Image (tube, rainbow, N blue to C red):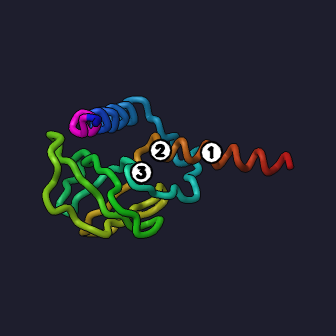
Amino acid sequence: MPNVKAILLAVLKGAACLFVRSRLDNVVSPPSTFTPPSVITPTVGRVVWFFPADRAPSDQPLPALVAHVWSDTVVNLAIFDASGNPVPNPPTSVPLLSASSVPPGGGPYCTWMPYQQGQAAKTDALAKQLAARS
């Protein structure tokens, strides 16, 4: 049986590396050239960034795993603190915002990581190119 703690640690390290890389390398293009994907469909086990209601603007997002999908825009999460420890009693029915959404005032929310948004945008662009050829 796989070591769950080791798997989660690897996922969290990957999310942290992507966060740092997105800050340093501007993984997501500027708004003038970046076309957000239509919708990324959430599935159980996907990694997202969680922003608590009491978050300061300078705080980094917390890594979270999708635990249950209510819809394309509402999910339940397993959230981890900055030390990699599970957050007890995480909020449920958390809004999952797309790249073009405005964060709600005062409530928690989550977003896709910039890398995931970039990959989805590339997939959408490729699908449009293929459709244009048909």
Q: Which residues are magenta?
A: 3-8
Q: Residues within 10 Å of mark 2 (few under 14, many from 20)?
A: some
Residue to which mark 1 is pinned: 123
Disc 1 secondary structure class: helix
Point 82% across, 49% down: residue: 132
What amino acid type is highlighted by mark number 3?
Trp
> In the image, which disc is placed on residue 116?
2
**Pointer 2 with pointer 1, Cβ within 8 A:** no
Point 32% across, 66% down: residue: 94
Give the CA separation, mark 3 to mark 2.
Answer: 6 Å
Point 17% across, 61% down: residue: 54
Q: Quadrant of the N terminus?
A: top left
On the image, the x and y values in percent for residue 47 come to 36, 47
**Pointer 3 with pointer 2, Cβ within 8 A:** yes
**Against 105, is 13 above or below?**
above
On the image, the x and y values in percent for residue 65 come to 32, 51
Give the CA separation, mark 2 to mark 1.
Answer: 11 Å
First along the sequence among labels 2 and 1: 2
Residue 49 relative to residue 31: left or right? left
Q: Quadrant of residue 53?
A: bottom left
**Against 41, is 60 above or below?**
above
What amino acid type is highlighted by mark number 1?
Thr
Dominant SS of magenta comes to helix
On the image, the x and y values in percent for residue 63 come to 28, 46
**Against 97, is 86 above or below?**
above
Residue to which mark 3 is pinned: 112
Residue 116 relative to residue 134: left or right? left
Q: Residues within 10 Å of mark 3 (few under 14, many from 20)?
A: some
Observer-nearest of 34 and 46? 46
What amino acid type is highlighted by mark number 2?
Gln
